[in-house]
Amino acid sequence: MGTTTTAPAPREQDRLAALHRLGVLDTPAEARFDRVVRLARQLFGVSTAMVSLVDREVVVHKAMAGFDERVVRREDSFCSSAIQGAGTFVVEDASVDPRFSASPFVTPVDGIRFYAGQPLVAPGGFRVGTLCIADETPRAFEAESASLLRDLASWVEKELVIDSELARAAEVQAGLLPRSAPAVPGYQVSGACLPSLAVGGDFYDWATTPDGGLVLSLVDVMGKGAAAGILAAAVRAVLRGSAFGADVAQSLLHAGAILHSDLSGAGVFATAFHAALDPRTGEVRYADAGHGLTVLVRADGTDERLEATGLPLGVLDEPAREQRTVHLGPGDLLVTFSDGVLDLVDGTLGAVPRVVDALRGATSADAAVEAVLRMSVGVGDRPDDLTVVAVRRDG
């Protein structure tokens, strides 16, 4: 093809930016794309099918069947020409086409003769690659076949965009989590949230009150993924807007009344632990909507699990919420976590003692959070979102 690499034109710069925003260039092979190239190879009766991404100087094959070079020079690739137009790019016999006859993929006796590539369009209308097929035998490419190739390429486009959108959603969701621990004299506070997928249904939140106290929450929306993430954002916003200071039961009741129709209408529920700490006395007032996964590990070695005080949000529009109180003494540690932690063991409440054992000896809130997260080491793919919040009173 003999083109010379020069500085990209402004439009090309935008195209390259769109490609890199997809975040798939340096990722390993994925079954969802491998399936479509195998299908294309079979449907069209060709020797080769690929999902190609055209970068500045190279073409990266995200998926390939009948070809074994993951990266090739852009100047040697048919796909570089294919993305110049919006329609299906067809070369019926590359050996007699002056644009490609000297290509190293064409000159061998068994080299490429036929090529058809459908551009893949990223958000913004930028053509970032192709779904392409190739064969060693020249052939015509009928309109019906071109239509089928476009349909398959449309599926690939949607999968590429889904990844990009999920990555952006993950960034937004991470940005909603607290960015730093609150300053509460005499106490340490720490938290972490690890979604099972790009976006999760768990979140934690905290805020200091005008009188120097601390209000914290951990919410676990049933399910995982984008749908759970959307509902989690809604619960967070409502719970923040329903703040009644130390009256955490009233806050949870008010939030539940607002959210009930949305949660029940979506067929999901959310468990929640909502608490207020008075740092002067160590008193912790809490209301628990069906969560029941909060433990108090005392400095003397004893421990206690704080049970739920009511049903999860979205189950019933309850007329009242119960508030209870525990005392956090010097060296005591309060930890609340999502049920994804239980799934690291056996998924039942019988795993709670394992969590308590992991927490023993933690001399800071950060150490407590790290101890819980370490339970996921060696598990492989996390079966559910993993969220933990810890408050420790200085000894």
Image: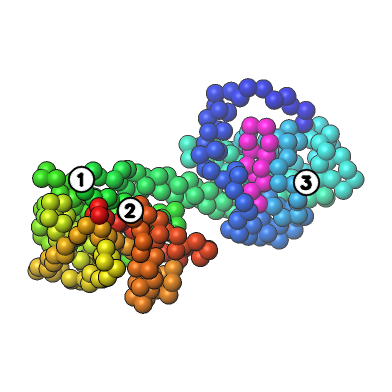
Question: Where is mark 1, residue-wise?
Answer: 185
Q: Where does the image place residue 186, in percent across and percent down from the top left?
A: 21, 48
> In the rendered image, which quarter is residue 289 located in?
bottom left
Classify residue 263 as left or right of residue 145: left
> In the rendered image, which quarter is residue 73 located in?
top right
**Residue at left offset 37%, top offset 54%:** 367
- What's the amino acid at mark 2? Ser
Q: What stretch is highlighted in magenta?
A: 51-63
Q: In which quarter of the image is the C terminus?
A: bottom left
Question: Where is mark 3, residue-wise?
Answer: 114
Distance between the Cα atoms at labels 1 and 3?
A: 73 Å
- What's the amino acid at mark 1? Pro
| Residue density around tag 2, few if under 14, some if 14–19, many if 20 or more, within 10 Å | many
Question: Where is mark 2, residue-wise?
Answer: 364
Q: Where does the image place residue 305, in percent across and percent down from the top left?
A: 26, 71
Classify residue 144 as left or right of residue 172: right
Q: What element carries label 1?
A: loop
Classify residue 90 as left or right of residue 209: right
**Residue at left offset 44%, top offset 50%:** 166
**Residue at left offset 35%, top offset 58%:** 362
Tag 3 near tag 2, CB within 8 Å: no
Between tags 1 and 3, which lies in front?
Answer: 1
Q: What element carries label 2?
A: loop
Nearest to the observer: residue 41 or residue 53: 53
Q: Where does the image place residue 164, in percent across and percent down from the top left?
A: 48, 46
Instruction: Look at the picture and state if 21 lies above or below 381.
Output: above
Between tags 3 and 2, which lies in front?
Answer: 2
